[in-house]
Image (tube, helix red, strand yellow):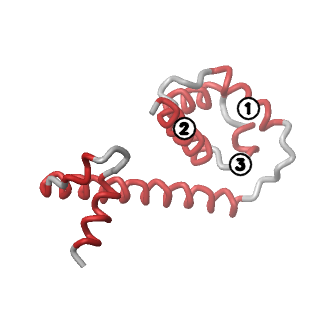
Amino acid sequence: MQVLSKSFSYIASVYALLFEFPSASHIASAHLTRLTNLLSAASKGRYNKDTAILFWETAKTSIGCRMPAKSLELKHTIKLIQELTTEIDEVESEIKCIMNKISSPILTIPGISYRIDAMIVSLSCL
């Protein structure tokens, strides 16, 4: 579970960074304090000024070009991913509530999650 939480922290940090600074030139021209604060907040303190400096210096030497249309597309894609993630979380929460009401014995089997339990129960109702 610790590896999973580290992955989510990393993903959240990348999304926050790319949403705020969607190109290497945006990162390179960012104020180092703003970059540090953004990474620290998004990673819940896991990334600090050293990480921000690494991104900032790497962006300065990047050969990537600035394309406003691609930057806008990236920001919209990140928003869409975040919205879909929220919707998935809502559906999974509702599935969990329904399965708790049903009190399915299938959940007692090791490795069976609420989602798998719901699929098995729904198939048995056909």
How many angstroms separate mark 1 from mark 3 (CA)?
11 Å
Q: Residue at x 66, y 27 (%)?
A: 52
Q: Is 61 situated left or right of 53 in this image? A: right
Q: Position of residue 1 (x, y in %)?
A: 45, 33
Q: Position of residue 64 (x, y in %)?
A: 82, 50
Q: Position of residue 9 (x, y in %)?
A: 51, 35
Give the SS element for disc 3: loop
Residue linked to disc 2? 7
Q: Is 95 situated left or right of 78 in this image? A: left
Q: Residue at x 34, y 50 (%)?
A: 112
The quadrant the C terminus occupies is bottom left
Callout 1 crowding tier (Cα within 10 Å): few <14, some 14–19, many ≥20: many
Amino acid type, residue under disc 3 in the picture: Ser
Vertical placement of 103 versus 20: above or below?
below
Amino acid type, residue under disc 1 in the picture: Trp
Q: Nearer the viewer, residue 68 or 52?
A: 52
> Are the residues at dot 3 and dot 2 in contact (C-beta closer than 8 Å)?
no
Q: Residue at x 71, y 48 (%)?
A: 23
Nearer the viewer's eye, disc 2 or disc 1? 2
Q: Which mark is residue 23?
A: 3
How many angstroms separate mark 3 from mark 2 (CA)?
22 Å
Amino acid type, residue under disc 2 in the picture: Ser
Q: Nearer the viewer, residue 82 or 27?
A: 82
Residue linked to disc 1? 56
Q: Position of residue 24 (x, y in %)?
A: 75, 44
Instruction: Tally the numbered discs.
Output: 3
Q: Is 112 situated left or right of 23 in this image? A: left
Give the SS element for disc 2: helix
Nearer the viewer's eye, disc 3 or disc 2? 2
How many angstroms separate mark 2 from mark 1 (CA)?
22 Å
Q: Residue at x 25, y 46 (%)?
A: 108
